[in-house]
């Protein structure tokens, strides 16, 4: 009976962990979008300058700043260059988070920006969403966790199982006298 309750508790734990996945993905996507909009706002003045003098090419603007003999302009070249790089990174992250759910999960697991991921983790608050995708994630994670733990426990218990001895019953044949 205790084993059954432990299975249910493990299933419930997996369910609660699984329903967190869509919420975390959504929080990460919102964080990326907020940073991307802020980055675009920071670059707006430089984009206007690049449009007027360099056909909208921010890299040429940064190159112009770098090639200037003025140390202030050279310093600004580093700052603007970092803003342009950050903007490009945030644009890539934003595009990755607009794909299907399985690509979003893969991106978060393998290629997400570590700084944005850490920010999302730090600010994330556990939530129980009752959206269909959250329910599906919850059930899938619950079943997977229950299966993995049960398999591990069964494997660990194998050496301790008592081997049943099969005894062949003797045949009793009637004796003829």
Image (cartoon, rainbow, N blue to C red):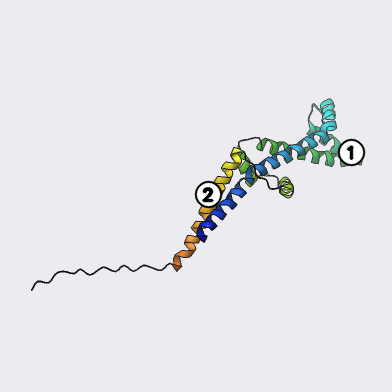
Q: Position of residue 73 (x, y in %)?
A: 89, 38
Q: Position of residue 106 (x, y in %)?
A: 61, 43
Residue 143: mark: 2
Helix, strand, or loop for circle 1?
helix
Q: Which residue is mark 1?
A: 73
Q: Quadrant of residue 69?
A: top right
Q: Position of residue 97 (x, y in %)?
A: 66, 38
In the image: residue 159, left or right of residue 109:
left
Helix, strand, or loop for circle 2?
helix
Please tell me which residue is depicted at 45% across the width and 68% down the height of the picture: 160
Mark found first going from the N terminus, 2 or 1: 1
* Front position in the image: 174 or 45: 174
Please tell me which residue is depicted at 83% across the width and 38% down the height of the picture: 80
Mark 2 burial class by Cα count in 10 Å: few <14, some 14-19, many 20+: some
In this view, which residue lies farthest toward the front? Answer: 1
Is disc 2 in contact with disc 1, using a CB cutoff of under 8 Å? no
């Amino acid at each position: 009976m205790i084993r059954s309750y432990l299975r249910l508790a493990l299933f419930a734990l997996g369910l609660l962990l699984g329903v967190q996945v869509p919420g975390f993905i959504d929080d990460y996507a919102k964080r990326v979008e907020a940073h991307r909009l802020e980055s675009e706002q920071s670059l707006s003045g430089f984009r206007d300058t690049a449009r007027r003098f360099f056909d909208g090419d921010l890299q040429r603007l940064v190159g112009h700043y770098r090639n200037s003999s003025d140390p202030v302009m050279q310093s600004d070249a580093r700052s603007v260059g970092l803003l342009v790089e950050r903007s490009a990174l945030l644009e890539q992250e934003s595009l990755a988070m607009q794909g299907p759910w399985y690509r979003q999960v893969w991106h978060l697991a393998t290629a997400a920006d570590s700084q944005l991921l850490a920010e999302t983790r730090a600010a994330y608050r556990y939530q129980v969403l009752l959206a269909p995708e959250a329910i599906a994630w919850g059930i899938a994670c619950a079943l997977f966790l229950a299966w993995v733990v049960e398999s591990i426990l069964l494997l660990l218990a194998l050496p301790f199982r008592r081997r049943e001895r099969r005894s062949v019953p003797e045949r009793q044949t009637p004796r003829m006298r």
